[in-house]
Image (cartoon, rainbow, N blue to C red):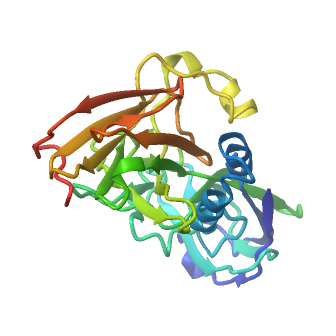
Amino acid sequence: MAVSAALGAVLTGCSMIDEDLSGCGKEVVVEYDVELVTNMSLELEMQLDAQTDKEIMDVLREYMRRIFTDHAHDVDLSFYDTQGDSTRLMHDQHIMDANQRRYVLHLPIHDYQHLAVANIAENRLVELANDTRCHPAQLLQQRADTITPHTTGLFTARLPMQLVEGIDQTFFVRLYMANCASALVVAPRSHQGLPIRVVASGFASQYQICDSAYTFAPSAPVMATDMLTAKTDPRICFCTVNFPSREPAATRTVIETQEPFVAKPGEQSLWEYRVYVTNADGSVTESIVGIREPLRAGLLKIVQVWIGDDGRVNSESPEVGVSVTLDWKPGNTYEPEI
């Protein structure tokens, strides 16, 4: 799915550009595509049944509606010098809220490295930081003991732009998703109505835009949002939106770009859920649900589990491993409010 964001605004005034750049430049057309490459529909079809799991599917579609979207609300555009310390030469921000527009930019003749970010303005958990220079520019996640999920699907792009005098030029910029989502579908069984809390961890904390690279430490655990289904289905969806997980070394191949939805599980867990279940006697059972398949940018991963009589989480998936602590006591890593 793609949105052609052909954006329309004319930027004028040579004073916005470094005085050493000669002339008032030329008009160039920059067209933006927000490329939503996602497995959401495929994952829903593979993990859930359209008839028996309809309520779960409806809950997930509604929650993910603003994350996996083909609509860019806002766009942040930066044009950097390719020489020296990669200083930003022009910066522009627009509220798009439209599917088809174009930017007609008035830029001095120069070589630029262009970075673009979409949907950052309304994301309360992630900010655009260190962006006065090209290479340090990053999407920086909020630092805290525990955070809530990202609130928007984030898109970024990078493109070298060499302006040539006397030639009409059009540049095409494709923005791709930088974050992803997961859903833990829990059947509470005998624990229906008792407190259940879920946090997820193992995800990146920052994204270097120019290099398209993630940084993984330190990274705050994500408190999953619990979404109850209708009364006819007692299951609970715990949803997260976050940066991707690590990749197992064995899958660092061309398959990542040609077939982004195909990944072989690694030998060890790459990310995990920690599920805290309160039992009827007041004790707490901790289950660490480790996922051996990477969670990549643009993707949704659904994991289904059920709770046993002693509060432990159970799964039939070969991609999932579970370790359990009965009568769990709060430690130094995470203390859920239960």
Say whether residue 205 is visible: yes
Q: Residue at x 70, y 70 (%)?
A: 71
Say whether residue 114 is visible: no
Instruction: Give the answer, above or below, for where 208 lies relative to 87.
Output: above
Residue 25 image offset from top left, x and y in percent:
73, 71
Q: Residue at x 31, y 54 (%)?
A: 197
Please give left or right for residue 205 compared with residue 72 in the image.
left
Residue 307 image offset from top left, x and y in percent:
38, 42
Instruction: Name the image quarter holding residue 21.
Output: bottom right
Please give left or right for residue 295 compared with residue 51 in the image.
left
Question: In which quadrant will I find the N terminus?
Answer: bottom right
Q: Nearer the viewer, residue 32 or 168?
A: 32
Q: Nearer the viewer, residue 279 or 63?
A: 279
Q: Nearer the viewer, residue 249 or 128?
A: 249
Instruction: Give the answer, above or below, for where 138 lies relative to 15.
Output: above
Give the number of callouts: 0
Residue 228 image offset from top left, x and y in percent:
48, 65
Question: In which quadrant will I find the C terminus?
Answer: bottom left
Residue 136 image offset from top left, x and y in percent:
41, 50
Please give left or right for residue 237 compared with residue 165 in the image.
left
Instruction: Name the image quarter holding residue 80.
Output: bottom right
